[in-house]
Image (cartoon, rainbow, N blue to C red):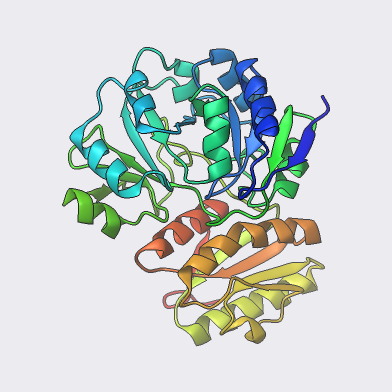
């Protein structure tokens, strides 16, 4: 299959390109498109065959649910059993934007889209290209991240081409995304609501609207053996090809531990990389050192993470160490993705000796 890659400007959207992308979806094909979070791989959410194609293109386990993207609130009642008051409150506060809500699904949504669950994950992105595309595609687009399963999510179209070129019909290249991490996912089918994936809509944000939310126990721990309730919960995700280890502790101890590990890696003829911040990057002796920005600018850290993991793959890095980014707010999303990428390989130097 030849994959058509087209440039599209968020400020001056080419209506004919959007209509062409919409026709592909309506015909059962797949189109990758930009959102404010990461690039998504879109198919017709109400067509079981389209959802199967998404799983096949990504190499994604079929019990890993897809997120249904809509362009307006009027579309919601057709795909959920009922719209709870909590959903209305959150939509008023955060939609369009990087928040996914899980509700009981309506009969119109096939099990192939929901990973066999009786719930559906729904999001309304804020990217103007995404919204126009969803409308042209019929209003209901199932879209996980546009990467091969397990790899870092793409924040530029070049990585979509790398992973999915020849597997899908079209890629809408809208340039660099704004945020760089996937949406927050909150389960509204339980009381109090539960955060299943942290993101830019933080726990504090959700509490401010709903009064009480909880975090799923697996957010920062190894996955359970149960079927995932939402994307990104059960399987290893966001992973570079090299072995990634997160190191936490005091700055001096972390630097010492990582530099020792880098030296040992080079002795084994392994190409090494490190993820650090502007404040510390100069302290490391890696073959490929990468800074995610200032530690105080957590939004920049979040945006740069997947790009750096992809760059390590481009450079052939085999052994990677990362500083820890523990904290509240968006830092929770960064650590959740890092832990997934590392397969929960974490060294706490406050209690570990070599």
- Give me the residue at 66% from left, 82% from top: 284
Q: Is residue 22 visible from the viewing direction of this image?
A: yes
Q: Is residue 312 above or below residue 213?
A: below
Left or right of 65? Residue 9 is right
- Give me the residue at 34% from left, 17% from top: 106
Quarter of the picture holding the C terminus:
bottom right
Left or right of 64? Residue 150 is right
Left or right of 351? Residue 268 is right
Left or right of 170? Residue 217 is left
- Give me the residue at 43% from left, 48% from top: 98
Quarter of the picture holding the N terminus:
top right
Q: Is residue 183 above or below residue 347?
A: above
Q: Is residue 226 visible from the viewing direction of this image?
A: no
Of residues 342 and 348, the one nearer the viewer is 342
Q: How many marks?
A: 0
Location of residue 2 by image quarter: top right
Location of residue 336 by image quarter: bottom left
- Give me the residue at 59% from left, 30% from top: 42
- The image position of residue 317, as x and y in percent, is 75, 62
Q: Is residue 23 above or below residue 11?
A: above
- The image position of residue 28, as x and y in percent, is 63, 16
Of residues 337 and 32, the one nearer the viewer is 32
- The image position of residue 157, as x and y in percent, is 71, 47
Q: Is residue 353 above or below residue 67?
A: below
Of residues 190 and 44, the one nearer the viewer is 44
- The image position of residue 218, as x and y in percent, is 37, 47
């Amino acid at each position: 299959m030849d994959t058509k890659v087209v440039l599209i400007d968020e400020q001056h959207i080419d209506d004919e390109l959007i209509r062409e992308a919409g026709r592909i979806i309506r015909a059962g094909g797949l189109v990758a498109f930009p959102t404010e979070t990461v690039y998504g791989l879109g198919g017709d959410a109400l067509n079981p065959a389209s959802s199967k194609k998404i799983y096949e293109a990504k190499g994604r386990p079929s019990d890993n649910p897809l997120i249904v993207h809509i362009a307006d609130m009027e579309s919601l009642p057709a795909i959920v059993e009922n719209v709870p008051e909590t959903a209305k409150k959150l939509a008023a506060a955060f939609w369009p934007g990087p928040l996914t809500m899980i509700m009981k699904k309506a009969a119109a949504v096939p099990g192939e889209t929901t990973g066999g669950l009786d719930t559906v994950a729904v999001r309304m992105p804020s990217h103007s290209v995404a919204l126009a595309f969803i409308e042209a595609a019929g209003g209901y687009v199932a879209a996980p991240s546009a990467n091969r399963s397990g790899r870092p999510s793409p924040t530029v179209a070049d990585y979509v081409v790398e992973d999915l070129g020849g597997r899908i019909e079209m890629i809408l290249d809208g340039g660099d995304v704004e945020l760089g991490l996937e949406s927050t996912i909150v389960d509204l089918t339980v009381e109090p609501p539960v955060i299943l994936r942290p993101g830019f809509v933080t726990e504090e944000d959700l509490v401010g609207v709903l009064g009480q939310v909880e975090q799923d126990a697996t957010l920062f721990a190894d996955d359970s053996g149960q079927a995932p309730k939402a994307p990104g919960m059960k399987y290893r995700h966001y992973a570079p090809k090299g072995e990634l280890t997160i190191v936490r502790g005091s700055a001096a101890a972390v630097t010492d531990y990582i530099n020792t590990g880098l030296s040992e890696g080079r002795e084994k003829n392994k190409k090494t990389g490190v993820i650090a911040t502007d404040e510390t990057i100069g302290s490391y002796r890696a073959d490929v050192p990468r800074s995610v920005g200032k530690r105080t600018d957590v939004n920049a850290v979040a945006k740069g993470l997947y790009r750096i993991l992809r760059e390590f793959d481009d450079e052939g890095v085999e052994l990677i160490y990362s500083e820890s980014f523990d904290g509240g707010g968006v830092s929770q999303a960064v650590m959740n993705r890092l832990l997934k990428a590392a397969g929960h390989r974490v060294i706490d130097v406050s209690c570990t000796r070599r």
